[in-house]
Image: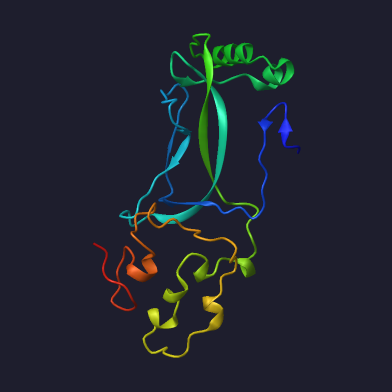
Amino acid sequence: MPQYDKKFGALTWGKQLVPAYLWYDGSRNASLVGDKIDPSSPVILNTPVGEKRNPSARIFPFQVHAAVQPYDTEKKILALPKLLDGYWIDFDWSKAIADGMKQVGLPYSGKYGFVETRMYSAVHHQVAPAKKALGCPDCHSVEAVTCTRCHKNAKDMDLAEHRRAVYPEAKNRLDFKALGYPDDPAQIGGRFYISIGRGAPPK
């Protein structure tokens, strides 16, 4: 597809994109039709649920779909424009929104604007083969990647490949502070402290 399409607007393409990493326990807080929004900041349509203290949560990769969508500026709700047999034919936002809102039974003030939205999709396709899976140093400090971290009797047995990043061009893949750590947990201790290895129990 081109960089601009009349149906979809401006499109940004990229390769070897690094996903967003968030805590995720398998559930989400979804935005429902008719929910009030705050147009002063991006509207998250399906917020992944999870945080460091939740034992069932894991750090999970997501694709982030960033878009701009119409909303009712008086009622402060996202608009549901009629696209097929609507906007994609005559490209009239006002008419498409009025028709779409009527179709789903929602009131429409007749006034609209545009708001940034974000939608998180799990990475289930276009995934690299197992041979190109992330290595430990792709996320953690090389100094923390040693066999003796978990195997005390493995002194002088560290393998060089364990210290080699598979994607060295991607720096700072994980934002540890955003994930709730003051620094790399492989160095300071993770959320579930085990007596073997390095680090101290998390506070």
- The answer, for residue 150, to whether it is visible in the render is no
Q: Is residue 72 left or right of residue 57?
A: right
Choose between 20 and 129: the one closer to the eye: 20
Q: Is residue 99 left or right of residue 71?
A: right
Number of disc labels: 0
Up-down relation of residue 33 to residue 90 (above or below): below
Q: Quadrant of the N terminus?
A: top right
Choose between 198 and 170: the one closer to the eye: 170
Q: Quadrant of the C terminus?
A: bottom left
- The answer, for residue 18, to whether it is visible in the render is yes
- Residue 29 point in image, percent of width and height: 41, 38
- Residue 64 point in image, percent of width and height: 54, 43
- Residue 137 point in image, percent of width and height: 50, 70
Up-down relation of residue 106 to residue 2 (above or below): above
Q: Residue furthest right?
A: 2
Which residue corresponds to the image point at 52% horizontal and 38% vertical from the top-left? 119
The way the protein has been coloured in the rendering is: rainbow
Q: Residue furthest left?
A: 203
Q: Give the quadrant of residue 37.
A: top left
Q: Give the quadrant of residue 8.
A: top right
Which residue corresponds to the image point at 40% horizontal and 58% vertical from the top-left? 176
- Residue 97 point in image, percent of width and height: 58, 15
Up-down relation of residue 52 to residue 103 (above or below): below
Q: Is residue 92 left or right of residue 106?
A: right
Choose between 54 and 68: the one closer to the eye: 68
Which residue corresponds to the image point at 33% horizontal and 76% vertical from the top-left? 198
